[in-house]
Amino acid sequence: MTVLYPAALMGGKTVLYAEVGAALSTPWRTAQLRSVVLPDPVKVELGYQGGKMVTVFEAQAPDDLAADWRGRSENATVRGLPAWRREIGPQGFQDVRLETLLKWVAGACGGQIDVNVQGRPQRHYQVRRGPAHRVVQEALSAWRVEAALIELDGGVLHVGPESRSPHAAAGVQAQLVQGRNLYEVSDVGGGRYRLALPGMAWLRVAHRVTVKHDLVQGRVRITDVVHRWAGPGRTWLEVVT
């Protein structure tokens, strides 16, 4: 019998505790790291010894960490997409399309963007000074466009319908079966369920999985995901039918 030991790496060095979470309600991923020397850039890989490691978190030195934290051994919480929290604006536009404005925001903050929305030109539009992610959300509201903001691998911000995100388009990413690779399921109401499973570091917000359990059957979409590598690797999902 082969025993697979979980492994978490940052900058190629072993990390004893790493937790990376993401949710549709927040544009960026969050990494919690304990007793580590925080490098620049921060890159967290999860997997099993002797197997493929999966990059679950990447970010340049975060703007919101004090300079004296860098390079020290600390318990750190680091957020992804730091460029999208930089302040930009004010700026006025004439006859501007939504997709053009969003690409301008990306250029102004230095972030990467995957735009999957469109909007008719607005005669006049004024960008207020503020964090880039808030500028994006205000623009979506002004154009009355519903869209999800999702951090993709490689530090790219997806702006568009959740159903048309690269994660949603990737197809079913796991088959979860009661008694096999599904440890626990709880019904949280409104067609939403929380799932506990062995570590599956490739799973992302907006991925689709299939579930076979007494409480829920069929294809569901992931709205929240947490990967925790501390001792055994574990993944927790919140899904909606």
Image: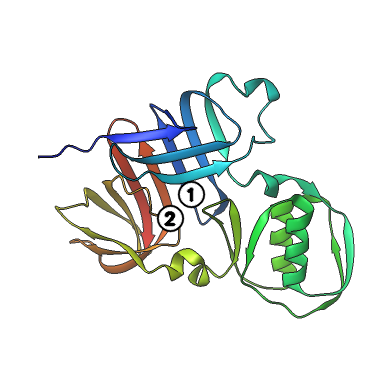
Q: Quadrant of the C terminus?
A: bottom left
Which mark's residue is nearer the viewer, 2 or 1?
Answer: 2
Direction bottom: furthest residue: 120
Would you say 180 lies left or right of 19 here?
A: left
Q: Residue at left 55%, top 27%?
A: 38
Q: Is residue 5 above or below residue 137?
A: above
Pointer 2 local density, CA inside 10 Å: few below 14, some 14–19, many at least 20: many
Give SS at disc 1.
Answer: strand
Query: Coloring scheme of the render?
Result: rainbow
Please state which amino acid type lies under the numbered disc 2.
Answer: Arg
Instruction: Pick whichever, 5 or 191, lies toward us.
Output: 5
Residue of label 2:
204
Give coordinates of residue 235: x percent, y percent: 33, 46
Residue 41, picture quadrant = top right
Q: Residue at left 45%, top 70%?
A: 169
Q: Residue at left 72%, top 71%?
A: 99
Question: Mark number for residue 22?
Answer: 1
The residues bearing labels 2 and 1 have C-alpha atoms spaced at a distance of 8 Å
Give coordinates of residue 11: x percent, y percent: 50, 32
The tag earlier along the polypeptide, 2 or 1, is 1
Give coordinates of residue 63: x percent, y percent: 69, 36
Q: Is residue 93 above or below residue 10?
A: below
Pointer 1 local density, CA inside 10 Å: few below 14, some 14–19, many at least 20: many
Marks 1 and 2: in contact by CB < 8 Å?
A: yes
